[in-house]
Image (cartoon, rainbow, N blue to C red):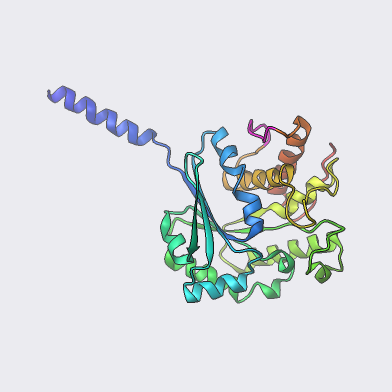
Amino acid sequence: MKHLYCLLLMLLVLARINAVTPVKILAIGNSFSEDAVEQNLHELATAKGIETVIGNMYIPGCPLELHAKNMRADARAYRYRKIDAFGKMVQVDSMSLSKALADEDWDYISLQQASQLSGLYDTYQPYLHALIAYIIVHVPTKAKIVFHQTWAYAQNSKRAGYENYGKNQMKMYRAIVRASRQAMRTEPIALLIPSGTAIQNARTSSYGDTMNRDGFHLDLLYGRYTAACTWFAVLFRRKVKGNPYAPKDMTPQQVQISQWAADAAARHPYEVTEIKL
């Protein structure tokens, strides 16, 4: 009996050692975080044996200023979507930041600026600083704060706010790079997720300027996949190239372009890398 007890105890210890602990990711954003994390990221991780829990706090077009206002008021203003370790998505309406931060033992918490303001660093502060300070107080010390660098609009975009950049895609991209680099220099941010650079890399390929479905949101297939690949490469510190997961309607060449664009952005987040495919 004693021998059996010892054997069971040893098996229990081994099971706990070998148990996979999910990587828990919370995005505080808007429709651009919806484009980036609500599809494909879970599947990319699963394909490499990584369990994830992914949350997205969503208000359409929400800038840092409004996130900070909601933080101060503890406003139940968000649609909260969470993808569990099995890939099941649940949605909670009227969620507050405080409740979302307490909902899981998050490993990564991302912030981002609204797209039309993403290249204007003066609009980041003091809101980014206040949000980071709030997160540090309200989450465990192991959580890392990351910043999601979003993408420039399509060259022919009619989106309001594009005039902030002279309706010029490269001017907008360069402004986003400057602003995200300044955020990384001035705030205690652990990682930059350069989706903006990955999308710009992909635009140098045979994709051309087709990465957006409406001039600013990402194409539902390879646009969203490229962004998710970038999150994967940065958060898990490994190349996404060769990952076997891709949406079924993508061609092998499209998969290769998106994966290469993401890996290049992870290596060089502040400059465009030409993708010759």
Q: How many marks?
A: 0
Residue 10 in picture, x, y percent from top left: 26, 29
Horizontal side of 30 relative to 177 (left or right) equals left
Q: Is residue 91 above or below residue 275?
A: below
Q: Position of residue 219 (x, y in %)?
A: 74, 48
Left or right position of 153 against 244? right
Quarter of the picture containing the C terminus is top right
Q: Is residue 217 magenta?
A: no
User: What residue is drawn where x is 82% and y is 47%?
Assistant: 210
- Residue 245 magenta: yes
What kind of secondary structure does the magenta stretch mostly adopt?
loop
Q: Is residue 20 above or below residue 131?
A: above
Residue at 72% across / 34% down in the picture?
Answer: 249
Going by the image, does 140 lie left or right of 47? left
Seen at 48% across and 76% down, the residue is 73
Q: Nearer the viewer, residue 235 or 150?
A: 150
Q: Is 188 above or below relative to 228?
A: below
Looking at this view, is 187 or 95 the one in front? 95
Q: Is residue 276 visible?
A: yes
Q: Which residues are magenta?
A: 241-248
Q: Which residue is at 82% across, 41% downward?
A: 275
Q: 148 or 221, which lies in front?
A: 221
> Looking at the figure, which quarter contains the N terminus?
top left
